[in-house]
């Protein structure tokens, strides 16, 4: 019999180890609550102590990133790579550059990534990394020098069969280009050590759109399961980055009314709904505007609310697509009072524990990020196989594969999460991901 045979034992153990890492505790407890019964029901899982082993990163790499700013002065940031679990494939997960980045946040993201990657069905393990570097207000040259300095250290720890980073918050195609350029320069190797690359040097079609599009494919599967349709649904989206804007594009394409976007400064509400042209304009111009949403507000005559989130508005579907813990218990209550019917996480863990409890109590379908935002990493997985075979799939074939993968993840959630009169998507996703990882751990021994 292993150490943790009930949730309280597990909680005491993990809290004792990482008392100050609140995001990491939030993510590990949330998973353990859902899988503890499955764990206890399987002797090999207990014998191999899979739950505790899955809750400890296999490796944490922490390094300094000294670089030169435009004034010729030295600046120093901290960089990390959390290689959480490599049981089912090379470590895989994005890089985040943001001043709030710390070990707890990257550990929770790496932990979530393992289960998400397992749900895709592809042979990819889980990782995350990044730096406490704030790219806002930096020149292009400074961003390039920072990316090069970051990769000068990271490159010794990654490779197509070891660990394959990608983008995340503030790491888009420009940063991936600089990071990959430095990796190639040092290693003299073309190939799949990084995904999210430009199409001109080994990138995959649909990778940029994949997380947002995948979120809407998941939404369509959820709606079908509940005998509803996306057309004319009022959708509130938070964020105005890669995930949010591509989710908005796909939702509008299917006839939904997207009423909001947001960023760290406030939110834009457009009651009549945004159009495809509005979103494409935001995608094309966001790099050149200080605040793309205030500019968009002027363009579409929408309302800009300084410092606010979209969750006060009346909507059928909420898609939080900005960052972790952006939707709290009070916001969840307001959404429910306003009769929200579905919540799907586009970001990683955007709903706080309290918000999730509210949604759980109300029994509306709630799909966690590890299932609903898996489209990005799924297409990254396909980018890896395209690089390995020196082939490129067409836009249409990759988009169809993305849709199939999202529908397959939906089915796994339904199969594992069916309860009396509802589908508990969060529990279903946790159990399905856990089983795949736990089985691999048992087969590979300690
Ligand atoms: P981007 O950097 O492209 O955009 C992030 C957006 O979120 C920006 O609009 C940003 O606003 C906003 N934001 C960041 N912090 C806050 C905050 N504290 N409050 C309100 N808004 C905030 O990132 P992505 O779109 O790529 O990522 C968004 C989320 O999706 C993250 O949780 C990420 O981990 C997750 N994700 C991303 C994937 C991908 O393929 N890109 C894959 C799977 C998950 P501002 O510009 O003002 O900071």
Image (cartoon, rainbow, N blue to C red):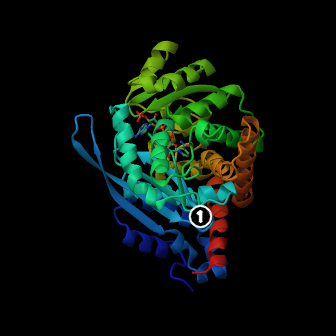
> Looking at the image, which is closer to me, 421 or 373?
373
Instruction: Where is residue 141? Give x, y as percent.
Output: 35, 34
Quadrant position of the N terminus in the picture: bottom right
For the C terminus, which image quadrant?
bottom right
Rendered residue at 45%/56% (across/down): 155
- Report crowding for label 1: few under 14, some 14 to 19, many 20 or more residues within 10 A (C-alpha): some
Left-right relation of 257 to 63: right
Q: Which residue occupies the foreground of this view, 208 or 257?
A: 208
Give the structural element (helix, strand or loop) at label 1.
Answer: helix
**Residue 319 shows in the view:** yes
Query: For this rendering, which residue is in front, 93 or 211?
Result: 93
Q: In the rendered view, tell whether residue 327 sits above or below residue 138.
A: below
Confirm whether residue 327 shows in the render: no
- Residue 309: x, y in percent? 45, 33
Residue beneath the point at 43% across and 74% down: 13
Q: Quadrant of residue 37?
A: bottom right
Report the residue that reaches farthest toward the bottom.
Answer: 1
Asked whether, in this view, residue 146 is left or right of residue 335, the answer is left
> Where 11 sits versus 362, above or below?
below
Instruction: Tell which residue pokes out farthest to the front in this image.
Output: 188
Residue 154 image position (x, y, % from top left): 42, 56
Q: Residue at x 52, y 78 (%)?
A: 4
**Rendered residue at 71%/50% (across/down):** 410
Q: Which residue is mark 1?
A: 34
């Amino acid at each position: 019999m292993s150490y943790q045979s009930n949730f309280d034992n597990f909680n005491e153990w993990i809290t004792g180890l990482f008392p100050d890492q609140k995001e990491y505790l939030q993510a590990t407890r949330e998973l353990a609550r859902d899988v503890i019964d499955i764990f206890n029901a399987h002797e090999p899982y207990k014998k191999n102590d899979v739950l505790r082993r899955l809750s400890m990163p296999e490796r944490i790499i922490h390094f300094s990133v000294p670089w030169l700013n435009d004034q010729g002065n030295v600046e120093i940031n901290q960089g990390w790579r959390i290689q959480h679990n490599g049981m089912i494939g090379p470590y895989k997960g994005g890089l985040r550059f943001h001043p709030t980045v710390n070990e707890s946040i990257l550990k929770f993201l790496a932990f979530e990534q393992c289960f998400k990657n397992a749900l895709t069905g592809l042979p990819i393990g889980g990782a995350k990394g990044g730096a406490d570097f704030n790219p806002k207000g930096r020149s292009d040259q400074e961003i390039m020098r920072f990316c090069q300095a970051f990769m000068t250290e990271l490159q010794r720890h990654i490779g197509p069969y070891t660990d394959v980073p990608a983008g995340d918050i503030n790491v888009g195609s420009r940063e991936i280009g600089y990071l990959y350029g430095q990796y190639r320069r040092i290693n003299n190797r073309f190939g799949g050590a990084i995904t999210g690359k430009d199409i001109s040097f080994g990138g995959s079609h649909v990778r940029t759109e994949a997380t947002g599009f995948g979120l809407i494919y998941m939404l369509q599967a959820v709606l079908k399961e509940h005998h509803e349709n996306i057309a004319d649904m009022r959708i509130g989206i938070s964020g105005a980055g890669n995930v949010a804007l591509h989710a908005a594009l796909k939702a509008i394409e299917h006839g939904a009314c997207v009423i909001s976007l947001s960023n760290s400064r406030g939110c834009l509400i457009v009651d009549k709904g945004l159009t495809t042209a509005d979103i494409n304009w935001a995608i094309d111009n966001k790099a050149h505007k200080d605040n793309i949403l205030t500019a968009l507000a002027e363009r579409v005559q929408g309302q800009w609310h300084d410092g606010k989130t979209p969750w006060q508005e009346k909507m059928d579907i909420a898609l939080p697509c900005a960052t972790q813990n952006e939707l709290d218990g009070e916001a969840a209550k307001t959404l429910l009072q306003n009769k929200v019917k579905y919540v799907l996480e586009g970001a990683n863990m955007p709903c706080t524990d309290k918000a999730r409890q509210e949604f759980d109590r109300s029994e509306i379908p709630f799909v966690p990020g590890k299932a609903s935002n898996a489209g990005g990493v799924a297409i990254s997985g396909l980018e890896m196989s395209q690089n390995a075979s020196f082939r490129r799939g067409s836009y249409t074939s990759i988009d169809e594969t993305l849709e199939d993968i999202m529908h397959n993840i939906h089915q796994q959630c339904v199969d594992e999460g069916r309860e009396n009169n509802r589908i508990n998507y969060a529990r279903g996703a946790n159990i399905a991901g856990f089983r795949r990882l736990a089985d691999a751990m048992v087969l590979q021994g300690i």
